[in-house]
Amino acid sequence: MEKPIVSMRNIVKRFPGVVANDHIDLDVFKGEVLALLGENGAGKTTLMNILYGLYRADKGEIYIDGKNVYFKSPKDAIAHGIGMVHQQFMLIDELSVVENIMLGLKEYGLVLDLKEAVKKINKLAREMGFKIDPWQKVWQLSAGEKQRVEILKAIFRNVKVLILDEPTSVLTPQETRELFKIIKKLIANNIAVIFISHKLHEVMEIADKIVVLRKGKVVGKLSREQATPQLLAKLMVGREVFLEITKRPKKPGHVVLEVKNLKALSDKGVLALKGISFKVRAGEIAGIAGVAGNGQKELAEVIYGLRKPLEGKIYLFGKDVTHKDIYERIRIGISLIPENRLGLGIVGEFSVAENLILERIDEQPFSLNIPLLSRLNIKKINDQMLLKYSRELIEKFSIVTPSPFAKAKTLSGGNIQRLILARELGRKPGFIIAEEPTAGLDVSATEYVRKLLLEMREQGYSILLISGDLSEVLSLSDKVMVMYEGEIVGAFRPEKVSLDDVGLMMTGVKRMPREVIEKIWD
Amino acid sequence: MGLEIKFIERELHPIMYIIVPLGAFSLAFLCGGVLMSWAGVNPISGYEAFISGAIGSPVKFADTLVRTTSFLLMGVGLAFALRARVFNIGAEGQYIMGAIVGTWVALLLQENLPPSITIIASLTMAMIIGGLWAGFAGYLKATLGINEVVLTVIMNWLAFKLLQWLLRGPLKNPLSEMWPMSPPIQAKIPVIISGTRLHLGFILAVLIAIGGYFLMFKTNYGFKLRVAGMNPDAAKYAGYDVRKIIISSMILSGSLAGLAGAIEVLAVYHFLYEGISIGLGYTSIIVALVGKLHPLAIIPSALMFGALYNGVVYLQSALGVSYTLSKAMEGMIYLFVLISEVFLKYKIRIIRR
């Protein structure tokens, strides 16, 4: 039997609080496409970063051509013929294509013969079946062209195994087809390709073998002939258990949030929301399920006001807030519990007390008028009131902190989330966006957050829950919508759905009819 | 194989914030001594002259306080811009614009109005023009994203060239053939200790520093400004108008620099000339940084740099040390102080790989 070109044995990698790779075995053979399939956080990228020398495994061995190897850095991995194209391209925008490709290649010595290199690049590109102008500066290229430069860069370094990390996430459908042609050329040249993805139809189209990861473990190894979308979705999502949560049935009240035909771009300039419409009512938790990166983040930002929509309308408590800034939206009654807690949620250098008052610093009684200056909205901070209010919140939300004066960044992750919740819920916002509210938290903090959200629901608050944790969304929500590539592809009551269907919707295989979605989302 | 230098952030005991800058000064003086002996000056008598020039007599100490005044006003202003993460390098130009407009207004009004009103009008207009001059750069940064460092440096040159032109044209004193300077100003800011040059502007500067402390640490405006500087994303998330904060911090910064320029003319020189600033605005950036961008801590910082400035000037005139050598010593002190900032903030480890 043919020997694998890469063989990973018993790979274990732990990060604080999680086992990202739990005894993983993986074999890759020459001239085949191996797809690594799994949800975000399943451990695909971690595993590939280990193979590429970016991380070191806590346990386990890597064999290249049967030889045990140890990579200290990507340099070693590249020397052994491993190449990787990251989601974020590692190119220098100001340099030309040829310069980027030649960068760091030692054998060419001190004097770079760019013309010679250009000839080689043109020849290679012709063989691969695509066009590229080697003299063009990288900043002038589209995402798809940049990706080709990355692939050429790898081929120039005599790559034997090429890892593509979610390569289609930045591509248009046409560019994706082009990429697949290139991949076929690569395997025809006996290069092995590892294709990381969570999109089932792509995997079914391009892969020879499919390895499914879930929560750091290999849960399935199949050939393309064995695989069906249903089977893959089931493996990927797993048998999620409903949480032990008692949720009293409740009749939803009036409409609190309504969005109509929202469209917005992502930071990369790709259309991330492709016309989203739904309503959320008082006393209701509306959940958004989906693999991260399908527009959830952009949706939260557009509703809160951090991102401008291209099109569409947002109504909050019946008011059109589409063109209102965050300051006004907060006063109408919106709250965001952000996923990026340290970067967005707190000011690390400020005290706990100051963080608890972040959005209300202009308000009475936290700031008092000063004659004349108040006209310029300059007011004196009422330290006593600030302290009193923060003590109340620290007590009510059981924030563990040495004192209200401690710097927020010194708190533990769970307590930082409590701080954010205390601040956001303490001002009784009416409508709450909870973005990955339990990600990275320990068991007790997770339980606390979930209970709190349900309590808010009881009190008549309206909550939009965005979470990659499917069991969380299904257990807490009154209604759930599934997002895939910037669209709502399914909407249902969580008790009336099969998990297999949810998996198929999350991976873009299945889509519910528009009328059904609209009915649930009214 | 290779060496890697690693910077680890640290927090030091507050006392180190006094010890480390002093250490930097000592090292700078040591190197300055080497320079002096190289130039044929006995370092000991050099430093004697230096110290006596800075604090040697009540008159000289008063002169040091006069120099402190401009550093203090500009340093406090810069603290606001820098805390909002706006790198205002333009205090120099804002100071010159304040001096120009302050002079102009004083010359226009002093014939017909009492000195007190002339002074108040002159200082107010200087603040307004300084604020607008800086605010313009802040506005372009906030709305168009233009780099404020480049912009303010260019505007410094613009202000200086404008000064040169005005002194040879509309603001020229017809009686002064040789030196380009403005006509004399009669509306003088009063001296508070007779026999010295210490003027009321110094008291005003200290009061403004105290007011600046209040504004930065005790008001909602200062709170939002500090949030916007430390974590602009969190500021947006909390609903702050970050653009407004950027622009207003520049206006504040520029108006204090403009005020400093007009005070210099109305209290010290009583006429406008080309050497009105000669880099005071750039030095003020270091004054603000050594004062940890804290308005109260900028008071001793400004005093220290005031003493340094006058000491170097005296060294030059007393011992005949060349202008270039004394400037080299001054530059060396700034260099050491800036390097010491890094040591204050980071632990530095050299790792062999």
Image: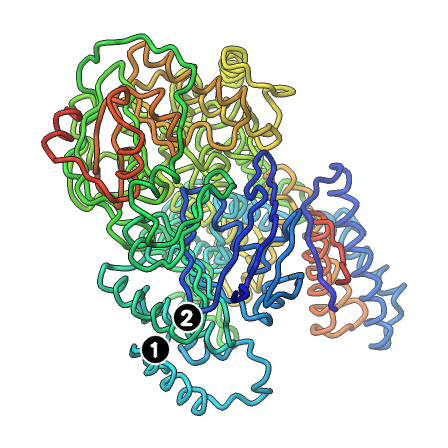
Q: Nearer the viewer, residue A251 or A403?
A: A251
Which residue is rendered at x = 65% and y = 55% of the image? Answer: A61
**Colour pattern:** rainbow
Note whether A164 is above or below A262 in the view shown.
Answer: below
- Mark in front: 1 vs 2: 1
Q: Nearer the viewer, residue A27 or B283?
A: A27
Label 1 sits on a secondary structure element that is helix
Label placed on residue A151 = 2
- Location of the N terminus of chain B by quadrant is bottom right
Note whether A103 is above or below A14 in the view shown.
Answer: below
Q: Nearer the viewer, residue A39 or A103?
A: A39
- Say whether residue A487 is visible: yes
The three-letter amino acid code for the residue at tag 2 is Ile
Percent across and percent down for residue B49 are 82, 61
Note whether A461 is above or below A230 in the view shown.
Answer: above
Would you say B113 lies left or right of A218 here? left
Percent across and percent down for residue A71 are 64, 61
Badge 1 vs badge 2, beta-carbon distance below 8 Å: yes
Which residue position is annotated with label 1? A128
Percent across and percent down for residue B270 are 53, 56
Would you say B96 lies left or right of A143 here? right
Which residue is rendered at x = 48% and y = 78% of the image? Answer: A156
Would you say A279 lies left or right of A32 here? left
- Location of the C terminus of chain B by quadrant is bottom right
Label placed on residue B272 = none
Label 2 sits on a secondary structure element that is helix
The chain identifier of the residue carrying mark 1 reads: A
Q: Residues within 10 Å of mark 1 (few under 14, many from 20)?
A: some
Percent across and percent down for residue B325 are 74, 72
